[in-house]
Amino acid sequence: MNHAVLGAKTLLERNVLRDLPKRERSLIVRAVALHNVFILPVGLDDEILLHAKLIRDADKLDIWRVFIELSTGTPGTGRRPRVSVCPTPGNTRPGSSLRSNVVRWCG
């Protein structure tokens, strides 16, 4: 599932941005839809590019919160999962796997 496209679709379907001017709604929906592509398309409008990068950065910060929560494991078990996330060229999102004991970020 592409969470960026799902997010943009949800914004539109639920009319979350209804009180904003049409131009701003369009900017936000496009930026959300593009924020997780591995390489942003060449030739994007500067404003869309800026907002896609801002959303991308916020998304990266949020995933670190998830990694930290995962790395602490389940309270009382003494076990910590291993989180391995390595982006590969051409993919719109990194592949990930959960194993045991180490947290590693590739990229």
Image: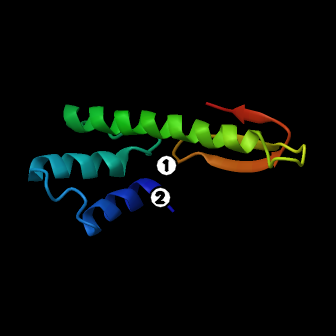
For the image, the number of numbered tags is 2
The type of colouring in the image is rainbow
Q: Is residue 48 in view?
A: yes
Q: Residue furthest bottom?
A: 13
Residue found 59% across the figure and 45% down from its top: 94
Residue 91 in picture, x, y percent from top left: 53, 48
In the rendered structure, the answer to whether residue 102 lies left or right of residue 104 reads right
Residue found 89% across the figure and 49% down from its top: 77
Element at label 2: loop
Q: Residue furthest front?
A: 76
Decide: is 70 above or below 17. above
Q: Are marks 2 and 1 in contact (CB under 8 Å)?
A: yes
In the rendered structure, the answer to whether residue 3 lies left or right of residue 19 reads right
Q: Where, by quadrant of the figure, is residue 51 drawn?
A: top left
Instruction: Please state which amino acid type lies under the numbered disc 2.
Output: Asn
Element at label 1: loop
Q: Which residue is mark 1?
A: 92
Residue found 21% across the figure and 56% down from its top: 17
Q: Which residue is mark 2?
A: 2
Earlier sequence position, callout 2 versus callout 1 = 2
Task: Rate crowding at label 1 as few (under 14), some (14 to 19) or many (20 or more) other CA atoms within 10 Å.
Answer: some
